[in-house]
Each structure stands twice: as C-alpha cells, then as structure tokens.
Image: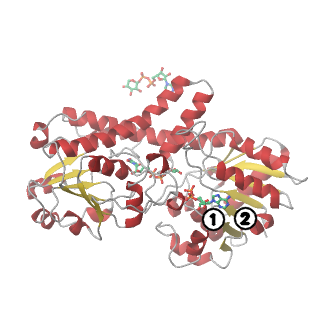
C-alpha cells in the first residue's frame, strides 16, 4: 500500500488530500500539522475551513484511509510520498521584505524530512514557492540524507477556494514537474499514477521542475492581471458612461480572450494573487529584469487603486465626509463561499472608511467577529498569514461592530457597501432595508450584485463598479 503524508493541514493540504483519499481507496493518506487545534478540528464535525462539499468527502474517508495527526515526524518517516503544503507568506523583514516569499516553514519542513527519513521518498512541492525552491530543498535533503534517495517534484495546486472540491474532482490540468533523470521520471510516474485514478491522462502535464514552479506563478499573475485590466476599464467606464458588464461581455466573446474572470470588482483578494505577483516581481528584479518586474507590479498597483477609488467614491458621494456615519459592510471574505479573509479587499476598504471616522457595522455569513476585528487592527504586512499565525491584538476597534445579519447591519445606516458577492445579498428585502436607513440612503456595490434599477426605484442612490453613474454621483467631486 502506498503511503502519502501531507505536511500542512491548511486550505490546500486538507481538501487536496481528502480528495486523493476518496479517489484512491488503496492509498493511505495522513495529513499532519504542527498546529494542534487545526488537527483537532479536522478530526471533529466542525472542520477548520469552510468549503462546499468538503464535509462529505472527509466523512466518507476519515478513519478509513484518511487521517489527520499532529504526529508529524512519525507519519513523514512512514510515507513513500511526502507532500509539503506549508504556508509561504511574503517576507515582512530583511532581504526582499514585502516581496520575496518567506520560506522559513518550508525550510524547517525539509530539514525535518531529512532528519526523520529512513527510506527513499518522493517529496512533492505543493505550496506556491519561488522558482528554484525545489533546487534549494533538494540541496537541504541531499546534504542531510544519510544515503537516502530523495526525489523532488513540483506539483502546484490550482484549486480556487469556494470551489475546491469541484476543482479537485475535475481539474483543468494537473501539472507535475521533475528532474529529467531516470529517477526523476520514475518519481513523476509514481505521482501520475496517483492522479490517474480519476484525472484523464491528457490532462496530466509533465514538465521540468522550473517550468512547473514558474507556471503556478504565471497562472496566478495572468488571472490577477485580467481582473486588474477589467478593473482599470471600470474606472474608464464610469468616466465615459460605458457599462463595464457590457464591455466584458463583448470582449469575452472573442475566443482568444474568453468570457471567464472578467468581473469588475472592488479588487481581488485571497492568499495567492498578490503574494505570487510580488514573488514574481522579486524574481525578475533579482535577475536584472526591471522592465518585466515593473509590468507585473502594475497589476498590484491597479488593485490598490481600485480599493482606494471605491473608498473615495463612498466618501465623496456622502458630502465628502463619513465621520460619525454608520456604514453597513455586507461581506468581508475575499470572495463568496469561503470564510477566508487573507488579503480581502474588505480590509483596505474598511480601513479607508475608518480613516475617515466612519462607524462600521459588518456582516459576513462565514467570517467570525474575532477575525474581522483582528484583521482590521493589523498591520498590512501581516495580512496574508493564516489567522492563527497573526499576532493577537486584543484591542477591539470601537468604531466597528460585527452583527449576525444584513438587516441589523443596515438598520439606521447612511450607506451600504457590498464587498463580497454572497448569494444571500441578492435576495435581501431591500425595500425593508431602505425604510430602516437614514436618507438619502446609498448602496455602493463593489461586486455588481444588485439590480440597480430596482434599487433606484425603491429610492436608493446606487453606485456599482464600472456602471453609468447616478445623476447624484455625477454632481459630486471627481474621484481620483
Ligand atoms: C486563485 C486561483 O484562481 C487558483 O487557481 C489558485 O490555485 C489560487 O488562487 P482563489 O484565490 O481561491 O484562487 O480565488 P479566485 O476565484 O481566483 O479569486 C481571487 C480573487 O479575485 C477574489 O477576491 C475574487 O473575488 C476576485 N475576482 C475573481 C474578481 O474580482 N473578478 C473575477 O472575475 C474573478
Ligand atoms: C488584430 C486583432 O487580432 C483583430 O481582432 C483586430 O481587428 C485588428 O488587430 P492583426 O493586427 O491583423 O489583428 O493581427 P493579430 O493576429 O492580432 O496579430 C497582431 C500581432 O501580434 C502580430 O504582430 C502577431 O505576430 C503578434 N502576436 C499574436 C504574437 O506575437 N503572439 C501571439 O500569440 C499572437
Ligand atoms: P495554504 O493556504 O497554502 O494551505 P495554510 O496557511 O492554510 O496555507 O496552511 C499551512 C499549514 O501548514 C498551517 O496550518 C501550518 O500550521 C502548517 N505548517 C507550517 N509549517 C509546518 C511544519 N514544519 N510542520 C507541519 N505543519 C506546518
């Protein structure tokens, strides 16, 4: 029986291993983590991450061929294939701070693997890491190997949060990079055999190590670039009277462009896009490619601009001040169907509004109050870390309350900001909400989710990203 061990029971390691266990009943899969509460949660009815369909998969295999354990060393020692899916935040200090990936967790995992191994192993890079990390890891492993053979593979994960199970069941492609030696090719084949249980052979792409590592960064950079491109267009649409949804639809019909990932928004978030682009920028700079670095940097800058533009729009619409005004924030997660807040645009928007002394009432169906308070009181450089690795800040922000539903959040508010596209926000009783708000009542839709005409009929002044502006908004000071 092949044994797989995955180091890191997070958003990537947990769901990926659960699906491998489900699809490969003859393989034993153990997911290990040094953070014990996470392991306890994986072994309970309340899984540590919210992901549609995940509960079912875990229930079907847990205790059979899927296990969660804090006994990291034991399970690594017993495994044939070790996936490494630890966190790789952006460095906050020292060389490359703010751009380079912090490989501390990776390095310590690699040293531990070398320490405890007594048999040959395939070590699989699963977390996004800078190009050439595999080489560094290979050096750590072989210099400490005591005669054991380690083969390093890069097998980047392309799942998106909220659709992880679907993405894992039916991936566009599985990418496996390895050494071009006979041993390297044998290792690639062994991992291919795992995926071949459910992924058609033509969707399994095999490349060299560097291509696999770079493809992951490139895929995320291209996806983020599409969003920044459409968001840049949204600013121009507002200035000209064009409608960004119509523009997206029209350009998406070109098969060379394609229709997906063209939704204008208040900005992209999530643990990957910004981190991976900054990483790419850093690698370019290290290689003396400053023009290429500047090109990609602009994708992040436009994303920042989009958040600032949104805040400016809110403030300028409301007579240039939100001081002391209650603003309802609907949605805090970086996208719907997840409770994850890493790099969520909601943080930047809320901090911007707080900077203008607004009173915020926040509702998100999945994000707990403590996490919201912690995110809003934190320094930007800490924000892409998973919640348990962020410093605790016990000082709750007085201007912020978190409430249990959208009606409570909006009661007595002057304005509503929709920051996550949760389905339930589409079907709210906006007439009732309007009646309970201060007038004029504003809706700022950062996800183009509401029916603008319907809301305007009710009496709201509505701003939607990239849509023709209300007469009211046109009369207000220009937004930079
Ligand atoms: C992303 C990649 O999609 C995935 O392949 C990779 O493995 C990890 O990073 P994820 O961050 O989970 O996945 O979510 P994704 O659906 O890509 O959304 C990222 C951000 O972009 C979200 O904030 C989302 O709201 C935003 N977005 C997405 C838009 O603003 N507009 C769009 O059209 C699509
Ligand atoms: C383009 C648009 O494709 C077309 O829709 C529009 O109406 C006019 O502009 P055209 O300039 O005729 O058409 O050729 P196109 O095939 O788009 O190529 C433009 C340039 O991009 C060429 O120099 C081509 O060699 C280059 N190119 C194209 C690349 O370098 N790489 C590619 O992958 C595709
Ligand atoms: P991702 O989104 O990439 O899955 P997460 O931050 O959600 O990242 O998960 C990474 C997990 O890896 C965390 O739960 C962390 O505790 C765990 N981890 C980090 N270093 C080690 C290590 N050396 N051994 C075991 N687990 C580790």
Left or right: where 466 falls relative to 276? left
Seen from the viewer's position, the closer of residues 333 and 238 is 333
Quadrant of the image occupied by residue 83: bottom right
In percent of width and height, residue 139 lies at 79, 44
Seen from the viewer's position, the closer of residues 382 and 212 is 382
Left or right: where 204 falls relative to 433? right
Which residue is most to the front? 395
Mark 2: secondary structure? strand
Q: How many marks?
A: 2
Alpha carbon separation for disc pair 1 and 2 = 9 Å
- Tell me: is circle 1 under 8 Å from ligand 3: no
In percent of width and height, residue 217 lies at 57, 41
Q: Residues within 10 Å of mark 1 (few under 14, many from 20)?
A: many
Residue in view at x 71 percent, y 53 percent: 108
- Tell me: is circle 2 under 8 Å from ligand 3: no
Which residue is most to the right? 147
Cβ atoms at labels 1 and 2 below 8 Å apart = yes
Q: Which one is earlier in the sequence, the residue at label 1 or at label 2?
A: 2
> Quadrant of the image for the N terminus?
bottom right
> Quadrant of the image for the C terminus?
top left
In the image, which disc is placed on residue 4? Answer: 2
Left or right: where 219 falls relative to 141? left
Residue 453 in sight from this viewpoint: yes
Residue in view at x 13 percent, y 38 percent: 476
Q: Residues within 10 Å of mark 2 (few under 14, many from 20)?
A: many
Seen from the viewer's position, the closer of residues 173 and 136 is 136
In percent of width and height, residue 412 lies at 15, 63
Residue 196 in sight from this viewpoint: no
Mark 1: secondary structure? helix
In the image, which disc is placed on residue 206? Answer: none
Seen from the viewer's position, the closer of residues 432 and 3 is 432
Disc 1 target residue: 17
């Amino acid at each position: 029986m092949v044994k797989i061990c995955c180091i890191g029971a997070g958003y990537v390691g947990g769901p990926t291993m659960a699906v491998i266990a489900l699809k490969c009943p003859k393989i034993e899969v153990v997911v290990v983590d040094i953070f014990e509460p996470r392991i306890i949660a994986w072994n309970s009815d309340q899984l540590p991450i919210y992901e549609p369909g995940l509960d079912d998969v875990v229930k079907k295999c847990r205790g059979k061929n899927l296990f969660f354990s804090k006994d990291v060393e034991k399970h690594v020692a017993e495994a044939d294939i070790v996936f490494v899916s630890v966190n790789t935040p952006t460095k906050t200090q020292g060389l490359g701070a703010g751009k380079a990936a912090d490989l501390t967790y990776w390095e310590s995992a690699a040293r531990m693997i070398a320490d405890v191994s007594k048999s040959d192993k395939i070590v699989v890079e699963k977390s996004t890491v800078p190009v050439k990390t595999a080489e560094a890891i290979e050096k750590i492993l072989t210099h400490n190997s005591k005669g054991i053979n380690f083969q390093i593979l890069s097998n980047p994960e392309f799942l998106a949060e909220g659709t992880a199970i679907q993405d894992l069941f039916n991936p566009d492609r599985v990418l496996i990079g390895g050494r071009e030696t006979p041993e390297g090719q044998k290792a690639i084949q062994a991992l291919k055999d795992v995926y071949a249980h459910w992924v058609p052979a033509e969707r399994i792409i095999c490349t060299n190590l560097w291509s696999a590592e770079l493809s992951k960064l490139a895929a995320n950079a291209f996806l983020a670039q599409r969003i920044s491109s459409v968001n840049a267009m949204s600013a121009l649409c507002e200035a000209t009277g064009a409608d960004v949804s119509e523009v997206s639809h029209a350009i998406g019909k070109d098969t060379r462009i394609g229709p997906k990932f063209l939704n204008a928004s208040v900005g992209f978030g999530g643990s990957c896009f910004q981190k991976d682009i900054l990483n790419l920028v850093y690698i370019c700079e290290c290689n003396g490619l400053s023009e290429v670095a500047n090109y990609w940097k602009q994708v992040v800058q436009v994303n920042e601009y989009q958040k600032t533009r949104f805040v400016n729009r809110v403030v300028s619409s409301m007579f240039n001040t939100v001081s002391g005004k209650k603003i309802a924030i609907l949605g805090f997660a970086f996208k719907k169907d997840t409770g994850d807040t890493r790099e969520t645009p909601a943080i930047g928007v809320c901090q911007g509004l707080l900077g203008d002394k607004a009173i915020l009432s926040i509702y998100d169906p999945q994000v707990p109050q403590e996490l919201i308070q912690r995110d809003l009181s934190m320094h930007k450089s800490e924000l892409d870390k998973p919640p348990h690795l962020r410093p605790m800040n016990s000082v709750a922000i007085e201007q912020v309350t978190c409430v249990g539903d959208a009606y409570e959040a909006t009661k007595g508010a002057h304005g509503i900001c929709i920051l996550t596209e949760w389905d339930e926000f589409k079907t709210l009783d906006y007439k009732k909400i309007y009646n309970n708000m201060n007038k004029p009542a504003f809706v700022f839709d950062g996800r183009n989710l509401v029916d603008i005409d319907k809301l305007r009929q009710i009496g709201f002044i509505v701003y939607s990203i990239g849509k023709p502006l209300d007469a009211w908004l046109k009369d207000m000071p220009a937004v930079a």
